Image (tube, rainbow, N blue to C red):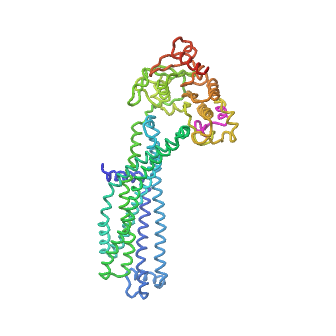
Amino acid sequence: MSNSAELTNVFRALLSRYPREFGLLLSVLVVEGFVAAIAVLALIPLTDYLLDQSLSNSHYITKWIVDSAQFCDVGPNFWLFGLLFAAANIIKSLLDVATSYTVLRIKYEIVRGLVDDTITVFFKAKWEFFARAKQGQILNTFNKELKNISDTLGGLATQLATIVQLCTFLAVPLYLNATITIIAVLLSILIGIPVLFLKNLSYRLGVQNIETGNSHIGTMSEVVGAARLILGFGRQNSARDRIVQAFDKHIAVTIPSQTLTMGIGILFQPIGYLAAIIALGIAINNGSPIAEIAAVLWSLFRALPQIGRIVSMHVSLHGFLPSYEQLDKLRKSAEKLQEDHGHAMFDSLHKSIDFKNVSFSYHGRAKTLQDINLTIKKGVMTALVGESGSGKSTITDLALGLITPQSGTVLLDGIPMSSYNKITYRERIGYVPQEPFLFDTTIRQNLLWAAPASTEADIWEACRLANAMDFVRQLPDGLDTVVGDRGIRLSGGQRQRIALARALLRKPDLLVLDEATSALDSESERLIQHSIDQMSGEVTLLVVAHRLSTIARAEQVYVLQEGRIAEHGSYEELKEKRGGIFARMVQIQNAKLAQ
């Protein structure tokens, strides 16, 4: 599909989706056009009076106004004609403001709809969509490119307004003197034709602008996210150079792109003036009335720059297309990966979650899991252990319903998970990842995010169970302490305990702890371990463990090796098994602790 055809489709879609807004804009423009015509025609009697106060050889429009004024017992004078001209232009200016307001309303209504629709589509997609997509591309799309789309969509509405205004400004001079008007318009178009050939250049610069913008935002996000690592390695200069180099590549494209967009309108304005002057020179030689020439000149000087704006917008629209295409591409990618939901509503777990002959592999990789059969019993602690890459986190993602088996089935109380609406299932889950994420708000709001209807007593009980109550009470603002971006104002152990309290506040049927103690110091691990021990027997626990002391009370331990279950039993059974994989893992960890 050509760029012009795609632009037409975009504009048609916007008109069909927002008919009320565009209808309001058109109504305001019609009224503004009428007043603009009066403002131009009001210049004729003012000019006639300034040239000859006797009005002995005045234009017929002047005569009509004089006759109308005399009907109201008002004689011809400077104040009559001057105030008429000023009033018409004041009203036109007020209508210009109304037009700008309407254009902004349309612009932000459209952008709000785009953001709402896109975010909705994104969060209906599988986790796979977020895993595949580049963070820089998503962030740049919602940060810079959405602003570009917003400005251009506002420009579409502005272009509609400009076209209506152009018709008004040309209608009056065509009525007064069609010859000079047609000559001026044709000259401006002929002189400005070469500008239209810049649209392909605008599109190419737009594509490069998007690509370098994605790279720059992606680099910035990565560097800021790795600030602790960068400082720890003393690699600040290297990080700075990466950001600056990415930015340099971006500005090398965005400067000519923006210059092209702004420059076309600026260059076209004197072209329009030149065309108007040539046409008026012809009119003067033909002996046209001075008052008529003044009105025509006033109209053309306002009309011909509008042609430049239309041409400029036409070229800039081709530069906007890559931004819209990237947004549309992300939406279509998310739509292709829409999550399937069953119709049954999940209320609670009664017996168990069962994996039956489950196999799974990530795109382009060997099988991560092969023929997995395991059971997560209600009220029991089930632990997953094994080397990195053995498939522990994949089983966790399957239990959360973030991914689906390529073969085999995950059953909830004997019913396939696919039969349930997964949102209702996840609402009954508490999840604590290895790297807990806290929002940049208060501890209270971080906790209520998981369970908004919780009472103050519920919050403190969750904090008690997570061994977070004492340290929260010691903070100057208690629950109203702001934790900073990702919880940076708290220690690692404190963040982990708040994350655990957040999960417990939901009173979940299943609590998933994904290596929740692997990065903690001994005291923090002891507190989390105590919390887990308190919950044992009351909450269904799925624990992915690196530190084996965390799962000392586990009734079920699955030892994974290269995507298969190598051993299965209770902690004590496997610990005492001679030559067992798990027994060897315990011995190695105990030996390290003893050193």
Secondary structure mostly seen in magenta is helix
**Which quarter of the rendered picture does the C terminus lie within?**
top right
287, above or below 325, in the image: below
Identified at 52% across, 41% down, the residue is 235
Q: Is residue 512 visible?
A: no
Identified at 46% across, 73% down, the residue is 88
Camera-side residue of 311 and 236: 236
When asked about the image quadrant of residue 335, the answer is: top left
Magenta segment boundaries in residue numbering: 445-463
Residue 392, given in percent of the width and then of the height, sits at 49, 25
Identified at 66% across, 39% down, the residue is 479
Camera-side residue of 303 and 528: 528
Residue 61, given in percent of the width and then of the height, sits at 39, 79
Residue 467, given in percent of the width and then of the height, sits at 66, 30
Identified at 50% across, 29% down, the residue is 400
Residue 560, given in percent of the width and then of the height, sits at 48, 20
Q: Is residue 262 magenta?
A: no
Q: Is residue 167 visible?
A: yes
When asked about the image quadrant of residue 334, the answer is: top left
116, above or below 23, in the image: above
243, above or below 310, in the image: above
Count of residue discs? 0
Q: Residue furthest top?
A: 578
385, above or below 28, in the image: above
